[in-house]
Structures are given as C-alpha cells and as structure tokens.
Amino acid sequence: MTKNALILASDIIEDAQHSGRRAGTSLEAIAAEQGDETMLAVLSEMDILTVAKIIREHDATIPSIATWLMDAESIKQLLNVEPSYWQNMDEDSVFCAQTEAHSLLSQIFLSYEDDEKQRELLKAIVEDDFGLLYLSLPFIGHDFSEMEYDEEQLSGSIEELLLKIKNLDEEAYREVLTVSSNGTLANIEAILKQNANKQRVTSVEMDTDDMFAPL
C-alpha cells in the first residue's frame, strides 16, 4: 500500500503543479476505483501545500473530495498554510482574502452534511489561534445584528456559513463574532500571511530533509 500510495501521490503532485482542479479529479478517481482508504493513504503522502492548492481551486459548488475526508488536524494545517497563496494574488484587483477564506470554509462546512465530523473540525480550528482568525475573516466588517437566525439563509452566503457555525457550536460562534467585531481586515490578513509563509518555509525544509533521508 505504501509504495503504491507514494507512486500515486507523486502523480497527483505533478498534476497539481498544472491544475489543482485536475489533481482533485484524479483523487476522486482513486477513491472511486480503489476506495476512500487508498485515497487517504495517497493524501497522507502529499505535502500540505499541494493539498491546499488542490482544495483552493475548488469551491462549495464543486468541492474537493479531500475536504470531506481529511481529519481535524489536517484541516487545521490546511488553514494555516492556505494564506501563503495569497501573496502572489495581491496585485490582482479581483483578489479578496475574505472571499478566498469564505470559499474554503464553505467547502468544509456547507458542501456536505455531517454535523458530528464538522463539529470536530470546528473545535480543532477554534482551538488554534490562527485557525480562529481564519474562521473569523469572512465576517469582518459585516453587521449581523438584524440577521434572522430562524430563517433559511441564501445558499452559499456568509450568513449561511455563520448560521452553520452557530448550529454546530455556540461557543465557537461567539468567538468568531468577537474576533470579527474587534479585529481589522488588514491586521488579520497580515497575521495569517506571515504565519502561512513561515509554515511554507518549514514544509519545504522538511521535504528537503526527506530527500536526503536514508532509504
């Protein structure tokens, strides 16, 4: 299994260099043909930066299978490194960190129904300082004082995402509102980028060390 997973992971990583969406399709094919266990084995052999590239090139309408199957620790790592991809997009006038975070969080919490697992993911995210900042990012600058929590929200909206968080964990919901009310977009975005770039350097160093590890 390990040798096979390494070979498949190498192919997926090569795909991801060209297209995260195409790499995601390859992961789905592995799950369909060889089962979720094999797909997870392949995912475990991939660096988190490549996984982040695959997932961020999907959204809640066409989610990556990885977001459905990754465990809480992996999702936490994902949110820690994903902002490193924002650096190269800053000059793009269309780019918005809030939109990027909203899209990724919607994949995690709105693209499938599994409250028990999503509650576990939410707990892991909130327990991590950078995870909480990422989770709060889409809601900065918005006023939810008149939001009708007992009404169905527009599909894919930030209101729907916030309501999902509230339904999963009231304490996490309150923490998100506190951070989004007191923090500024510029500061939180800068903190997330700085941390993500540190994580990227660490990940690259670990991969380099692996290259010289004895076989």
Image: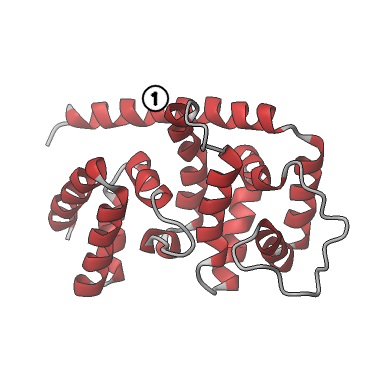
| Residue 98, picture quadrant | top right
Residue 215 place in picture, x, y as percent: 12, 37
| Residue 207, picture quadrant | top left
Q: Residue at x 73, y 42 (%)?
A: 140
Residue 147 place in picture, x, y as percent: 82, 62
Quadrant placement of the N terminus: bottom left
| Residue 115, picture quadrant | bottom right
Q: Residue at x 68, y 45 (%)?
A: 136
Residue 187 place in picture, x, y as percent: 68, 27
Q: Is residue 153 left or right of residue 40?
A: right
Question: Could you tell me the amino acid type at mark 1?
Answer: Val
Q: Residue furthest right?
A: 145
Residue 126 place in picture, x, y as percent: 66, 49
Q: Is residue 53 left or right of residue 157?
A: left
Q: Is residue 44 above or below residue 167?
A: above
Is disc 1 surrounded by few (<14), some (14 to 19) or many (20+) residues within 10 Å? few
Q: Which residue is mark 1?
A: 201
- The colour scheme applied to this rendered structure is secondary structure
Q: Is residue 186 left or right of residue 35?
A: right
Which residue occupies the foreground of this view, 212 or 123?
123
Q: Residue at x 69, y 33 (%)?
A: 185
Q: Residue at x 59, y 63 (%)?
A: 156
Q: What secondary structure is found at the residue carrying circle 1?
A: helix
Q: Is residue 55 above or below residue 197?
A: below
Q: Is residue 1 left or right of residue 58?
A: left
Q: Residue furthest front?
A: 93
Q: Is residue 69 above or below residue 43?
A: below
Report the label total. Answer: 1
Which residue occupies the foreground of this view, 195 or 23?
23
